[in-house]
Each structure stands twice: as C-alpha cells, then as structure tokens.
Image (cartoon, rainbow, N blue to C red):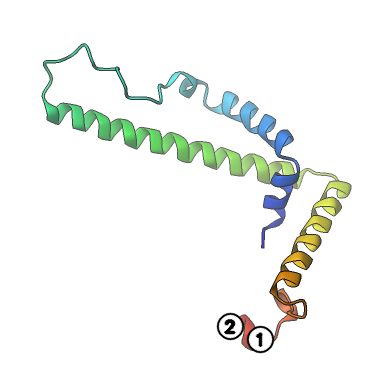
Amino acid sequence: MRQEQEVYHHLYQEKLEKLVKTALADRLPELQNVPTSTDGENDSDDSSDGQDMSKGKATETSSLKKIRALHMKIRREVRAEAWANETAEVRRHVKEAMIREREGVAEKKGGEEKVGLDRSPESREL
C-alpha cells in the first residue's frame, strides 16, 4: 500500500517535477555545473600514479552520492510541502485513488480479506 504523498506524486507527477526543478535550481545552483561522468577528465595527466587516481575517484563517487542524497531530500521536502498546501478537492481525489487501490489489492488477495485496522489484532502481528 502506498502512502498519501506517494499517490499524490503519482497522480500529479508533472506538477511536482516542475516544483522540484525550481527548488533544485534555487537551492543548488552551484551543483548545476558539476560533471557526472569521470570519462576523459584526467586523460591529459599521465604522470599521476594509480593511488592518486583511486583517491580522486573515491572522493568523486562520495561527492556524487552526497549530491544524489541532497536531490532526494529536496524532492521529499518539496512533495511534503506541496501536499500540505493542496486543496481539499485534490486531497479527496488522492484518497479516492487510495481506496480504489486498496479495493484492487483486496480483490487480488481473495476479496474477503480485511485491510489495516479492520483486521484482527492477531493477524496484524504477522
């Protein structure tokens, strides 16, 4: 089962992507010019030994991971803020989509199975 914000993101993906791009441009303008590939960047420097190259690649990989983590953090923050500021009609639309999704899952599992707190306490412990 997906959370409300996940369903919201799925239904309003284009709107959220625009908001994310704007937020990334505002918060990370210096990272826009960071190269993501390591091919051919140090080809002209043949005199460096292998240890320096491996340290550089490790540092570069670490910084790319940090950049990606920061991108995901901004994405989550933008989605949470957009969801908090949405209208009642959009929230109702998302809740209806969640209900339809739950009904579809219940049909696949056998139709009569209960979902969430409708289940018995014993079945919730599993």
Counting from the top left corner in percent of width and height, residue 6 is at 67, 51
* Relative side of 24 to 70, left or right: right
- Residue under the point 69% across and 45% down: 9
Image quadrant where residue 99 sits:
bottom right
Q: From what the image shows, is residue 99 above or below residue 81?
A: below
Counting from the top left corner in percent of width and height, residue 57 is at 26, 31
Q: From what the image shows, is residue 103 above or below residue 12?
A: below
Q: Residues within 10 Å of mark 2 (few under 14, many from 20)?
A: few
Which quadrant does the C terminus fall into? Answer: bottom right
The front one of 104 and 95 is: 104
Counting from the top left corner in percent of width and height, residue 82 is at 72, 41
The residue singled out by tag 1 in the image is 121
- Residue under the point 69% across and 36% down: 16
Type of amino acid at the residue the image marks with label 1: Pro
- Residue under the point 70% across and 46% down: 10
The residue singled out by tag 2 in the image is 125
Which quadrant does the N terminus fall into? Answer: bottom right
* Relative side of 33 to 39, left or right: right
Q: From what the image shows, is residue 41 above or below residue 122?
A: above
The front one of 108 and 63 is: 108
Q: Which mark is residue 5?
A: none
Q: CB under 8 Å between callouts 1 and 2?
A: yes
Type of amino acid at the residue the image marks with label 2: Glu
* Relative side of 68 to 27, left or right: left
